[in-house]
């Protein structure tokens, strides 16, 4: 959530920067400014009224103790009027605060100055490209056909058991999934991340804290009987571990990693873009999360991008790094880099990771602070990244490594799979 003081002091700058996201926020920012002013005036009136009422009550008490009850009667009437006024002012204040909070949650994070303008992923800025794009023969198969041919994934069984977007992995397909998860977790721990095994369901406060609610309410699976949400990413429970905490400055950065199953309702509908593993309702992912000092968060972002890049290099898969444009930027993110691997049989780039700096957007909602060396409690910065999401990465590995004799397994995974080829 944005800081109200920022809007109070520089509302035009807020409007200007949100235009990079293709959002015209002039009207809502103006209304927020009006509500903030009304709230502060009303709070002052309420404080003055309560102070006056407290003073009169003390005077009434003194008069009764002095046996001058008759003189206290007019003051009691005045006290009653002040109490009535204070109740009315409190109701007015609550109304201002309620509408203000509702509008504040509708504003996304301000984009970093380096975020390019644009509307869709086609306008994202390619920062770098790594590896050699493989050229396959005309008989090359897409991953969904390879998965069927080698009995790695049963899409029909998943549809029967649950529905479209819930594949069943089996045999060496399941082993390969497990190998990827183990490899990513081991690498994260080697790089200073503490492994977390989080819950797969969260409450509304947690979903609000990291920005899923109210922005992505319709994209999350909701368990009505228990008022809980299935997580779309382990970022949500892991980051919320630090909700309402005040960390010590020397504890920063906090670095966590977690594997989880992820659940997302927005899996798309038809065509090659959603075929096979390209877009699922349920998938596996290893996440990395950092809580950092505000002055070091962009250094941490660069470090996380380099770390995810190192994983893709070890897997020997061609990839590129893209800086997201304003129109493609996530609701809570100030700056996001996507990692896209090349899928040789589909002849297209597939996103397998997003690494984002949320600055204080999440920590403001989470009340996640640290005590600085000056003794002040300041909001920390939060970051997260996929390291990595499995489905599209698995698709690229299967397609890019297919040969006439089968599918080669990248060298770094063989100690985990126990086999060199499928």
Image: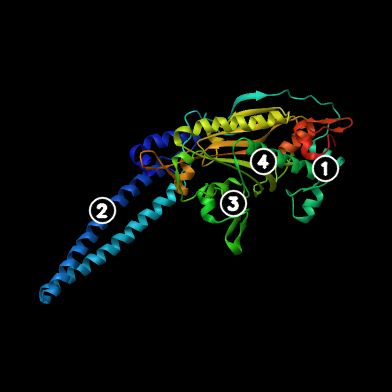
Residue 389 position in % (x across, y down) = 67, 40
**C-beta proximity under 8 Å, tags 1 and 4:** no
Q: Residues within 10 Å of mark 2 (few under 14, many from 20)?
A: few
Please give the name of the residue rendered at 67% of the width and 43% of the height, measured from the top-left corner.
Answer: 285
**C-beta proximity under 8 Å, tags 1 and 2:** no
> Which residue is label 3 attached to?
218
Residue 84 position in % (x across, y down) = 26, 67
What scheme was used to colour the molecule?
Answer: rainbow
Please give the name of the residue rendered at 21% of the width and 67% of the height, measured from the top-left corner.
Answer: 81
Measured in 3D between alpha carbons, the distance from the residue under mark 3 to the one under mark 4, in whole angstroms, is 30 Å
Decide which of tag 3 and tag 2 comes sooner along the chain. 2
Decide which of tag 1 and tag 2 comes sooner along the chain. 2
Residue 10 position in % (x across, y down) = 35, 36
Q: Nearer the viewer, residue 132 or 126?
A: 132
The disc label shown at residue 44, or none: 2
Q: Nearer the viewer, mark 1 or mark 3?
A: 1
Left or right of 4 on screen, residue 311: right
Left or right of 246 on screen, residue 202: right
Q: Nearer the viewer, mark 3 or mark 2?
A: 2
Q: Nearer the viewer, mark 1 or mark 4?
A: 4
Quarter of the image that includes the N terminus: top left
Decide which of tag 1 and tag 3 comes sooner along the chain. 1
> Which residue is label 1 attached to?
172
Q: Secondary structure at mark 2?
A: helix
Q: Nearer the viewer, mark 2 or mark 4?
A: 4
Residue 197 position in % (x across, y down) = 63, 49
Q: Secondary structure at mark 4?
A: helix
Please give the name of the residue rendered at 18% of the width and 67% of the height, measured from the top-left corner.
Answer: 58
Q: Residues within 10 Å of mark 1 (few under 14, many from 20)?
A: some
Rendered view: 78 above or below 129 = below
Please give the name of the residue rendered at 52% of the width and 47% of the height, measured from the top-left corner.
Answer: 210
The disc label shown at residue 185, or none: 4
């Amino acid at each position: 959530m944005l800081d109200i003081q920022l809007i109070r002091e520089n509302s035009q700058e807020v409007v200007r920067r949100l235009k990079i996201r293709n959002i015209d926020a002039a009207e809502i920012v103006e209304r927020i400014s009006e509500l903030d002013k009304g709230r502060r005036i009303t709070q002052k009136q309420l404080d003055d009224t309560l102070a006056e009422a407290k003073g009169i009550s003390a005077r009434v008490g003194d008069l009764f103790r002095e046996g001058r009850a008759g003189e206290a009667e007019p003051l009691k009437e005045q006290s009653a009027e002040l109490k009535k006024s204070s109740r009315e002012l409190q109701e007015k204040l609550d109304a201002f605060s309620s509408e203000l909070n509702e509008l504040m949650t509708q504003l996304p994070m301000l984009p970093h100055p380096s975020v390019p303008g644009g509307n869709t992923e086609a306008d994202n800025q390619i920062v770098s490209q790594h590896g050699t794009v493989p050229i396959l023969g005309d008989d090359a198969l897409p991953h969904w056909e390879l998965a069927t041919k080698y009995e790695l994934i049963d899409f029909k069984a998943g549809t029967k058991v649950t529905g479209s977007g819930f594949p069943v992995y089996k045999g060496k397909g399941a082993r390969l999934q497990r190998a990827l998860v183990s490899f990513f977790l081991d690498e994260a721990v080697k790089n200073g991340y503490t492994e977390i095994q989080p819950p797969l369901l969260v409450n509304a406060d947690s979903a609000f804290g990291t920005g899923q609610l109210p922005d992505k309410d319709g994209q999350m699976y909701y368990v009505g009987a228990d008022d809980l949400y299935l997580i779309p990413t382990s970022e949500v429970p892991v980051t919320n571990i630090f909700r309402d905490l005040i960390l010590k400055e020397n504890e920063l950065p906090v670095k966590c990693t977690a594997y989880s199953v992820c659940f997302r309702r927005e899996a798309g509908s038809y065509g090659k873009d959603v075929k096979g593993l390209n877009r699922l309702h349920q998938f596996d992912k290893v996440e990395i999360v950092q809580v950092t000092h505000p002055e070091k968060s962009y250094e941490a972002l660069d470090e996380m991008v380099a770390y995810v890049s190192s994983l893709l290099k070890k897997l020997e898969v061609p990839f590129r790094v893209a800086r997201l444009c304003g129109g493609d930027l996530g609701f809570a993110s100030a700056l996001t880099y996507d990692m896209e691997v090349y899928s040789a049989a589909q002849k297209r780039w597939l996103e397998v990771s997003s690494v984002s700096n949320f600055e204080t957007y999440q920590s403001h909602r989470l009340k996640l602070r640290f005590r600085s060396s000056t003794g002040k409690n300041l909001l920390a910065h939060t970051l997260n990244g996929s390291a990595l999401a499995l489905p599209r990465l698995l698709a690229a590995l299967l397609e890019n490594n297919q040969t006439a004799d089968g599918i080669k397994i990248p060298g770094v995974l063989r100690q985990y799979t126990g086999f060199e080829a499928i």
